[in-house]
């Protein structure tokens, strides 16, 4: 089977579609013929992506959406289904970064990170999947987790909790739904060159290194286009957990599967790695 599906006639919804991985995925899905609903907290960036898709001859609609608001996610699902009658690809991707030593982290940080990164995915699942089950055609749900959903990172406990949660809910849902025609994948990107570090919540020690970490992501991060290609591939041939790029994720992931203790030194060294320039 081709890794480059023909998506003409398909409808996709991409949350966090205004930037980075979501933007790259929206553009790629549209390039392959899908009509893409681009949803983002920032209406301006969602609209910019729609204009880019239309300029390339594709079809897209922009939506302002806060994924941490269940009523808003439910309203989006209602309006997309009213307009299209079906959704073939749901990419629950919106997320925020967070880094900080635990004594500098706040209760509000936990609520925000879990609210966007984990509950945002859960609300997407809850609003769209019951409708997708009724539409009578197969579909793909792709949830953006992270390498930090497979292995721990020091000073990123809220973020890791949210992303381990996304991996867990994706595996659970796939077990429930794959025999009913809906495949669920957890995409686990490593270090990707997007604004996530510069726009994320940073506290304490990590606030001091934000600039250097951001430069590291820009210099050494993989392209979001590489992640979008992996998403396209898993839509064509479903995979449950998708590390991307493999050169970042596979070794720590395998070590963690052998013994969680083995990756503790690596979890502690992440801060040093991303500040070495
Ligand atoms: N960049 C990386 O290295 C990396 C690695 C692993 C996982 N991820 C994950 O990839 C996903 C996309 O991140 P990115 O790197 O492309 O970052 P990004 O900042 O470029 O894109 C995130 C997008 O999500 C939107 N967003 C944030 N909060 C939102 C909300 N409440 N509702 C709707 N939209 C919201 C932002 O406006 C932005 O457009 C996130 O879930 C992130 O955790 C990123």
Image: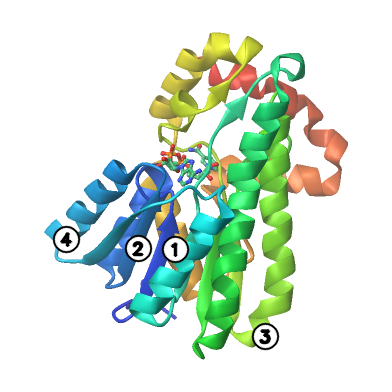
Foreground mark, 1 or 2?
A: 1
Q: Is 34 placed above or below 93 here?
A: below
CA–CA distance in space, label 2 to label 3: 26 Å
Residue 128, how many percent across, how many down? Answer: 54, 70
The residue beneath circle 1 is: 76
Q: Residue at x 51, y 16 (%)?
A: 210
Foreground mark, 1 or 3?
A: 1
Q: Residue at x 73, y 40 (%)?
A: 161
Residue count near mark 3 (Cα–Cα under 10 Å), binned few <14, some 14–19, many ≥20: few
Question: Cβ–Cβ below 8 Å for labels 1 and 2?
Answer: yes
Residue 8, how many percent across, how many down? Answer: 29, 79
Foreground mark, 4 or 2?
A: 2
Label 4 or label 2, whichever comes before in sequence order: 2
- Mark 4 CB lies closer than 8 A to ligand 1: no
Secondary structure of residue under mark 3 = helix
Q: Is residue 199 visible?
A: yes
Question: Cβ–Cβ below 8 Å for labels 4 and 2?
Answer: no
Which color scheme does this rendered protein use? rainbow
The residue beneath circle 3 is: 179
Label 3 or label 4, whichever comes before in sequence order: 4
Query: Which dot marks residue 204?
Result: none
Query: Which dot marks residue 37?
Result: 2
């Amino acid at each position: 089977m081709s890794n480059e599906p023909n998506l003409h006639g398909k409808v996709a919804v991409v949350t966090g579609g205004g930037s980075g991985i979501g933007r790259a995925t929206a553009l790629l899905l549209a390039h392959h013929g899908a009509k893409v609903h681009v949803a983002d907290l920032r209406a301006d960036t969602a609209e910019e992506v729609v204009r880019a898709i239309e300029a390339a001859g594709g079809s897209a609609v922009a939506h302002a959406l806060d994924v941490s608001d269940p009523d808003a996610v439910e309203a989006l699902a209602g309006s997309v289904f009213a307009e299209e009658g079906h959704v073939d690809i749901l990419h629950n991707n919106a997320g925020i970064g967070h880094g900080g030593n635990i004594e500098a982290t706040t209760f509000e940080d936990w609520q925000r990170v879990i609210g966007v990164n984990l509950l945002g995915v859960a609300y997407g699942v809850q609003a769209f999947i019951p409708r997708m089950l009724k539409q009578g055609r197969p579909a793909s749900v792709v949830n953006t987790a992270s390498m930090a959903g497979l292995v721990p990172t020091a000073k990123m406990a809220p973020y890791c909790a949210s992303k381990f949660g996304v991996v867990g809910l994706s595996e659970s849902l796939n077990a429930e739904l794959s025999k009913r025609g809906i495949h669920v994948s957890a995409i686990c990107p490593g270090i990707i060159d997007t604004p996530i570090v510069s726009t994320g919540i940073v506290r304490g020690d990590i606030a001091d290194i934000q600039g250097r970490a951001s430069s590291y992501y820009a210099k050494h991060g993989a392209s979001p286009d590489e992640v979008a290609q992996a998403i396209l591939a898993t839509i064509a041939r479903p995979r449950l957990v998708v590390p991307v790029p493999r050169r970042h994720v596979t070794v720590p992931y395998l070590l963690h599967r052998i013994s969680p203790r083995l990756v503790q030194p690596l979890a502690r060294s992440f801060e040093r790695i991303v500040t070495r320039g």
